[in-house]
Amino acid sequence: MTATGKIIPTRLAQQVADQIVQLGATPMVEARIFGLLVDAGYTPEEIGPMAGVHWARVFHRLALRKLSSDGQDMVDRGALSGETGYYVAQLSLVGQVGMLARIRNGEFADENAAQCAALDIQDAEEAAIPA
């Protein structure tokens, strides 16, 4: 590692980030590219300006890597948006399976309804954790 803690120099990291625009990256591709940069020692706050996005978007995309393989596949296919995927990624594997089935079954009128349902499940999961 370099003295700055970065595995690759900033110039090369910028070239990696530029691939997002050049590829017309989907949310899952963004997650993978951002993940490479995090693994190379960069923070979301550093990656955001490289990619021309706010660091919070980087943070949300990185969360997509916590999705089950089925969830990641749904994002890749466009069956699950990156925004809703972020909320689903916060759930346990069991919670993700249930939410993804409900999304596939068309149970939600819109993205907001799906996101609210995911938050409700997350609250229930957190409440079930012994203190």
Image: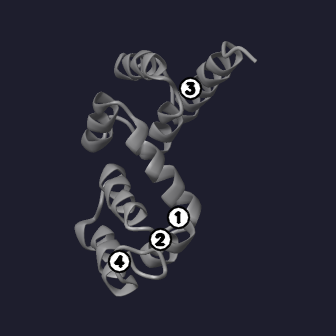
Q: Is disc 4 surrounded by few (<14), some (14 to 19) or many (20+) residues within 10 Å?
A: many
- Residue 24 located left or right of residue 60: left
Crowd class of label 3 (few under 14; some 14 to 19; many from 20; radius 10 Å): many
Under mark 4, the amino acid is Ala
In the rendered image of this protein, does residue 17 appear above or below residue 84? Answer: below
Residue 99 placement (x, y as % from top left)? 45, 20
Label 3 belongs to which residue?
118
Label 2, on which residue?
A: 47
- The x and y percentages for residue 4 are 49, 80
Query: Which callout, 3 or 2, points to the residue nearer the camera?
Result: 2
* Amino acid type shown at disc 2: Ile
Q: In 3D space, how far apart are the residues under numbered discs 1 and 4 (Cα atoms)?
A: 13 Å
Q: Which residue is mark 1?
A: 44
Q: Residue furthest bottom?
A: 11
Q: Are marks 2 and 4 in contact (CB under 8 Å)?
A: yes
Element at label 3: helix
- The answer to which image quadrant residue 18 occupies is bottom left
The numbered disc on residue 13 is 4
Instruction: Calculate the distance from the C-alpha at mark 2 to the C-alpha at mark 4.
Output: 9 Å
